[in-house]
Amino acid sequence: MRISVDTDKCVGGGQCVMTADDLFDQDDDGIVVLLDAEPGADRLPEARTAARLCPSGAIEVEE
């Protein structure tokens, strides 16, 4: 699995961090920071949920 984020799309909603705080963080402006671009397969459910909940569609998960 590979996760990518588009920081230009991010609106700082923070849903990703609330869903998977070991995969995502936010900088001082609230913009997403990807902590682990290639987590183990066991993290797929949380990564998918974070991508689905992202209000701006800034997160993509490739399996």
Image (cartoon, helix red, strand yellow):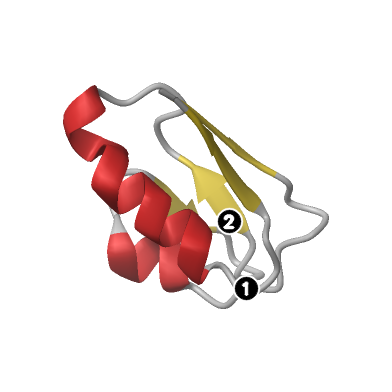
Measured as percent of width and height from the top left, residue 15 is found at 44, 72
Measured as percent of width and height from the top left, residue 34 is found at 50, 41
Nearer-N-terminus badge (2/1): 1
Which residue position is annotated with label 1?
A: 12
Q: Residue at x 17, y 32 (%)?
A: 42
Total marks placed: 2
Say what amino acid the circle numbered 1 marks: Gly
Q: Residue at x 56, y 78 (%)?
A: 13
Left or right for 32, reference 38? right
Residue farthest front in this picture: 63
Per the rendering, the mark at residue 32 is 2
Quarter of the image for the C terminus: give it. Answer: top left
Say what amino acid the circle numbered 2 marks: Val
Q: Residue at x 31, y 64 (%)?
A: 19
Do tag 2 and tag 1 residues touch (Cβ < 8 Å)?
yes
Residue 1 sits in which quadrant?
A: top left
Q: Secondary structure at mark 1?
A: loop
**Is residue 22 shown to the viewer in this render?**
no
Q: Secondary structure at mark 2?
A: strand
Measured as percent of width and height from the top left, residue 25 is found at 44, 55
Q: Is residue 11 above or below residue 57?
A: below
Tell me if mark 2 has few (under 14), some (14-19) or many (20+) residues whose alpha carbon lies within 10 angstroms of its own. many
Left or right for 40, reference 15? left
